[in-house]
Image (spheres, rainbow, N blue to C red):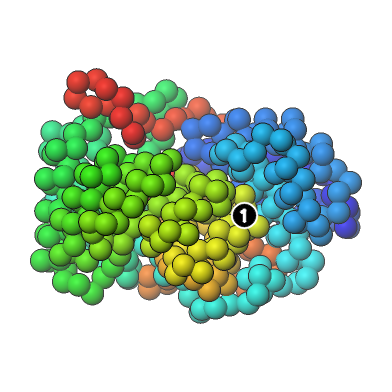
Amino acid sequence: MQIKSARVIVTCPGRNFVTLKIEVEGGLTGIGDATLNGRELSVVSYLEDHVCPALIGKDARRIEDIWQFLYRGAYWRRGPVTMRAIAAVDVALWDIKAKAAKMPLYDLLGGKSRDRVMVYGHANGGDIDETVDAVGRYIEMGYKAIRAQTGIPGVKGAYGVGRGDLYYEPADAALPSETLWNTTSYLDYAPKLFEALRDRFGFDHHLLHDVHHRLTPIEAARLGKSLEPARLFWMEDCTPAENQEAFRLVRQHTVTPLAVGEIFNTIWDCKDLIGEQLIDYIRATIVGAGGVTGLRRIADYAAIYQVRTGCHGATDLSPVTLGTAVHFDSWVPNFGIQEYMRHTPETDAVFPHNYAFEDGYLLVGETPGHGVDIDEEEAAKYPYKPMQLPVARLEDGTMWNW
Ligand SMILES: O=C(O)C(=O)C[C@H](O)[C@H](O)CO
Ligand SMILES: [Mg+2]
């Protein structure tokens, strides 16, 4: 089953997506997502200039060998650009293998471990009252788990406050917009949101919160402690994770469960966090961490330590990643939860798929492969648009973590 062609398709139905399409002799095709929000064209070049030519003639059935060829063969290992390119190839090859076997991908991985995949949606508002109302709307839609983010009075562009109820894309301009950050106001305000949410809705739903790398370890420990009465499902990215050690300090102070890893690329980024049981949920995902092959290694390692998965699923990951994740989540024994931020109708039209939301869960499709396709005519209607993620500064002008 030789690879005949490998092509990159860029489309912007509201936001940019990079897709790799591989065709093998005999005509089977598979697609993989290679989107890197705000840095899309770097992966396009990596694939077109360096990876695609080397794939032609390779045996598409040898997924592991091709993964190793691209990982070891680059010599310059890891990193978001390399690992997204590897993920795109890997997912396209798993799609082809599953189609050739006439199986949905989850079956090829080992079969279903569950019937449906619990997801969490994103509720947000300009202040606590608006956010409480937004969470109420998610509960009405059937969500069992909801991430809540609130604007903070006086803090322009606090993280996670969207421009609409269902669809939210933070990459909003050709050059980074400037937002403001104030840790003191945040640490004072955020716990009040969760107090208000529990007062209004009780404890029947899971609540999650994303700190988006903004706190120092001791500040994160304090937030975790102050959120304990709200019994969160998780507190995410409470402090930057380049220094994995930092989580030990947070852990020593709080029983609020910790999640981390949406920006991780390989098992090496989370090895100590998992092995030393410093986190509860690993957020690495298909497109970020080298495809099904890379993520499976991480999940299997995490299982030994009772760390569960919580795949990143923001809208900068295309329906190809989400669809593949739903197969992965259906199989993975140590599943925790799946993030689900809805794509716009334009995006859904470009990427026809067979996963479906029902009553707080995603249901996996039963067709062979990962169940997501690309309509190239539809994709061609939306040319690439430069868009970058915002940056954050403190009030005195110091650059901070966005
Ligand atoms: O979904 C999340 O948890 C995020 O933190 C979303 C990120 O800001 C987004 O994926 C950046 O592109
Ligand atoms: Mg996040």
Name the residue at the top extreme.
Answer: 397
Which residue is depicted at the point 38% across and 73% down?
359
**In the displayed structure, would residue 315 be above or below residue 101?**
above
Report whether 258 appears left or right of 287: left
Can see residue 146? no
Question: Is residue 206 or residue 359 the one in the foreground?
Answer: 206
Q: Position of residue 377 (x, y in %)?
A: 66, 44
> Residue 94 is drawn in which quadrant?
bottom right
**In the displayed structure, would residue 48 be above or below residue 223?**
above
Q: Position of residue 181 (x, y in %)?
A: 23, 33
Report whether 163 appears left or right of 48: left
Report whether 224 appears left or right of 108: left
> Residue 81 is drawn in which quadrant?
top right
Q: Quadrant of the N terminus?
A: bottom right
Check disc 1 and report its element: helix, strand or loop.
Answer: helix
**In the displayed structure, would residue 230 be above or below residue 158?**
below
User: Splitting the image into four quadrants, where does ligand 1 fall?
Assistant: top left
Q: Which residue is mark 1?
A: 294
Question: Is residue 338 or residue 345 the one in the foreground?
Answer: 338
Q: Position of residue 343 (x, y in %)?
A: 46, 51
Q: Position of residue 394 (x, y in %)?
A: 23, 27
Which residue is depicted at the point 45% across and 50% down?
261
Neighbour class for label 1 at 10 Å: few (<14), some, many (≥20)?
Answer: many
